[in-house]
Amino acid sequence: MVMSIVDPTLNANQKAYPRYKVGNLAFVEVITMPDPRIRDVDATRQNVAIILGENPHLVALPDKALFAHFAKNIRPNPDMLEVGDRIRTALLLATDSDSCEDEPTPTWTDAEGTLTIHYHRKVSSSRIGRAYPILQACTLTVDANQDFTLECTNRGRGDM
């Protein structure tokens, strides 16, 4: 059912891959291949969410309203989902990426009306024509109104 909603939205150079489902949300990764006549260009990736139900529909990510709805519903009872699934879902909804390193272990802390998610991710960087990963330490901070900010600081090359 999820793919029947996504497939009609794809161009000829796109492919979609279902990733996982949480509650009534299904997540799909859409990969867009570059024009074959263009060299040295990588494929791009985007995630979409499919809201399932009576009238299922597709939502491009990131989406602040969908993030706020998720946060409002999970914060009172976070143990409804395993911490990894909570973090993965929050990151996808807020940033369109669930890129998150296993070490150090990501954390989810909700205290005094503020949710704080600490995690590390690798992002691509290039210098003088050479691409290499940069390790970033990131903090996604969510207030009582489900408004969020994301701050990331470089921690050095991620391939050392």
Image (cartoon, rainbow, N blue to C red):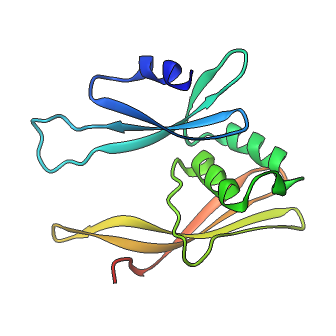
Quadrant position of residue 131: bottom left
Q: Residue at x 79, y 58 (%)?
A: 143
User: Where's residue 111, x and y in %?
Assistant: 86, 68
User: Where's residue 159, x and y in %?
Assistant: 33, 78
In the displayed image of the protein, which residue is found farthest to the bottom? 160
User: Where's residue 84, x and y in %?
Assistant: 66, 60
Q: Residue at x 81, y 49 (%)?
A: 74
- Depth check, front residue: 49 or 61: 49
Side of 54 where 38 appears, left or right: left
Side of 60 where 142 appears, left or right: right
Against 7, is 156 above or below?
below
Quadrant position of residue 87: bottom right
Q: Residue at x 76, y 52 (%)?
A: 81
Side of 39 where 57 appears, left or right: right
Against 109, is 62 above or below?
above
Against 134, is 62 above or below?
above
- Figure quadrant of the N terminus: top right
Side of 54 where 136 appears, left or right: left
- Depth check, front residue: 136 or 20: 20
- Figure quadrant of the C terminus: bottom left
Counting labels gives 0
Against 2, is 137 above or below?
below
Quadrant position of residue 24: top right
User: Where's residue 68, x and y in %?
Assistant: 74, 44
